[in-house]
Image: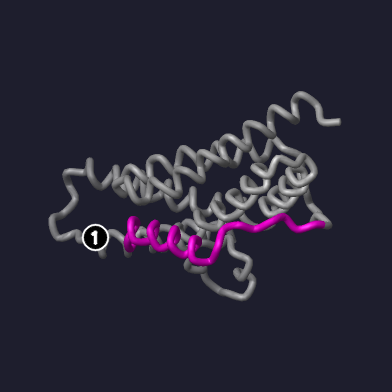
Amino acid sequence: MATDSFEKDRLEFITVAAEFCIFVEHAAVSSEKQTFIEQAVKYLPTLYLKTMLLPHVLTSPDDESERMVTEAEYENIRNTIEELLGMDDRYLTAFHPDINYSEAPIAASISEDLTDVFQELKDFLFNCQLGDETLLENALKNCLFGFHYHWGRKLLNALTALHQLLYSEAVNQDDEDVPPFVTQNNQKDSFLQHQLREDSKDF
């Protein structure tokens, strides 16, 4: 029998997951780039925390949950976020499953990370709406298993990249000493070089 504490944590997770999905579905269309970044760096830590408060699921559940996010919906959301962020969608990361086969950080994208998180949560929420406790429990286990081995890493990678963008842009806007010849392309190159140096410190 579920404890009151578990029920509370599960409800809060469902609430935050729903809010995040609504944000992803609508913010990329209705928000400016800077606003989207600012809101994303608020949602992601909260979502991570609420997920971590739930029991760890380290083995794959016996039953797969129903999937409802189509490939077309996935690509539509990913493309929308990618267009909103522009050239800042791409970043370098040393935390990638293929990093063992690479001598340098691997290029990734914020839009793909956020859409992967969205897909996992949207599928989970679909099963919640079916109104069956057994389906809900199974969907939650699948979602938490995916968190530990897939979308939790994606969430943190996106948060790191968005944090870098948010505060790099704020510094650039406030720095009166920035030469007038510094273009957006130069700023992007500088960001990638800085991130490459930061990632290399971990090795």
Please tell me in which quadrant of the rendered image residue 38 appears: top left
79 part of magenta stretch? yes
Q: Position of residue 39 (x, y in %)?
A: 41, 40
Q: Is residue 76 above or below residue 160?
A: below
202 sits to left or right of 23? right
Q: Main secondary structure of the magenta part?
A: helix
The residue that disc 1 covers is 184
38 part of magenta stretch? no
Q: Position of residue 47 (x, y in %)?
A: 57, 40
Q: Is residue 20 above or below residue 93?
A: above
Q: Position of residue 181 (x, y in %)?
A: 14, 60
Residue 190 visible, this angle = no
Q: Residue furthest top?
A: 4
> Which quarter of the rendered picture does the N terminus lie within?
top right
Looking at the rendering, the stretch of residues picked out in magenta corresponds to 63-87
Q: Is residue 13 above or below residue 83?
A: above
